[in-house]
Amino acid sequence: DAKTTQPTSMDCAEGRAANLPCNHSTISGNEYVYWYRQIHSQGPQYIIHGLKNNETNEMASLIITEDRKSSTLILPHATLRDTAVYYCIVRKDAGGTSYGKLTFGQGTILTVHP
Amino acid sequence: GAVVSQHPSWVICKSGTSVKIECRSLDFQATTMFWYRQFPKQSLMLMATSNEGSKATYEQGVEKDKFLINHASLTLSTLTVTSAHPEDSSFYICSARKGLAGDTQYFGPGTRLTVL
């Protein structure tokens, strides 16, 4: 699976938008971009995923560049409860021995300040 | 929807004993379940993948005789840590996927294992 690169940490003020970048320059055509987050001592929580179109749900928006080499997760109005480690993962959804597996990197520690 | 539970949420055991952790998909049938391990300040590491009714597939470096996985039904998978030792102390997390590989994985809340 394609490797992803994320900043180690980011800060955001409560009520402001949090924009979390992710580079995945070696992404293949059949690989999706998934975002999960992990609040301390809990299991990861699914946020959103996409292939090439921008996606939005009740939690966040996902913006994928046209060349698909990078993406940005946007939390439109961050709250203190959004403080977590955010993982950007590229996953094959068809074919290969890593079919469907999620490989977690180190993620971005997002801290939302009052 | 898509809730995954784990039991117990934490367990403390003596060295040499075996510990079983259950993972259940509460509102969907999970064809595939995954088991991860997470050490303090580290990311999640995939241990094994199990499909209902089949033997689990273990990742390189994971001892299949030490970490026994059973996926006997579409809603239940168990991980048994046999002859646990202090180095097995970790946060064990399961995830479940509804059907095809393209389906989203949903994670359980994790089980904290401490081996004395």
Image (cartoon, rainbow, N blue to C red):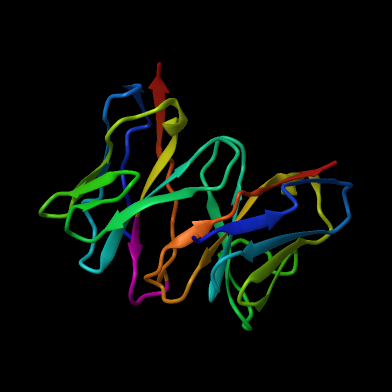
Which residue, as the protein is rendered here, is positioned at the far top? A114
Number of numbered discs on residues = 0
Q: Is residue A95 magenta?
A: yes
Q: Position of residue B39 (x, y in %)?
A: 62, 42
- Indicate left or right for A54 with B51 as reference: left
Q: Position of residue B112 (x, y in %)?
A: 71, 45
- In the image, what residue occupies the spot 60% across and 64% down? B26
- In the image, what residue occupies the spot 30% across and 50% down? A57
Q: Is residue A81 magenta?
A: no
Which residue, as the protein is rendered here, is positioned at the far left? A66
- Indicate left or right for A33 with B77 as reference: left
**Residue B52 against residue A37 in the figure, above or below:** below
In-front residue for pair B76/B40:
B76
* The residue stretch that appears in magenta: A90-97
**Residue B112 against residue A8 in the figure, above or below:** below
- In the image, what residue occupies the spot 44% across and 26% down? A80
- In the image, what residue occupies the spot 63% across and 49% down? B110
In-front residue for pair B44/B28:
B28
Q: Position of residue A114 (x, y in %)?
A: 40, 16
Main SS of the magenta part reads loop
- Indicate left or right for A12 with B58 as reference: left
Q: Position of residue A24 (x, y in %)?
A: 25, 50
**Residue A21 against residue B32 in the figure, above or below:** above
Which quarter of the picture shows residue B115?
top right
Q: Quadrant of the C terminus of chain B?
A: top right
Which quarter of the picture shows residue B22?
bottom right
**Residue B80 against residue A71 in the figure, above or below:** below
- Indicate left or right for B105 with A71 as reference: right
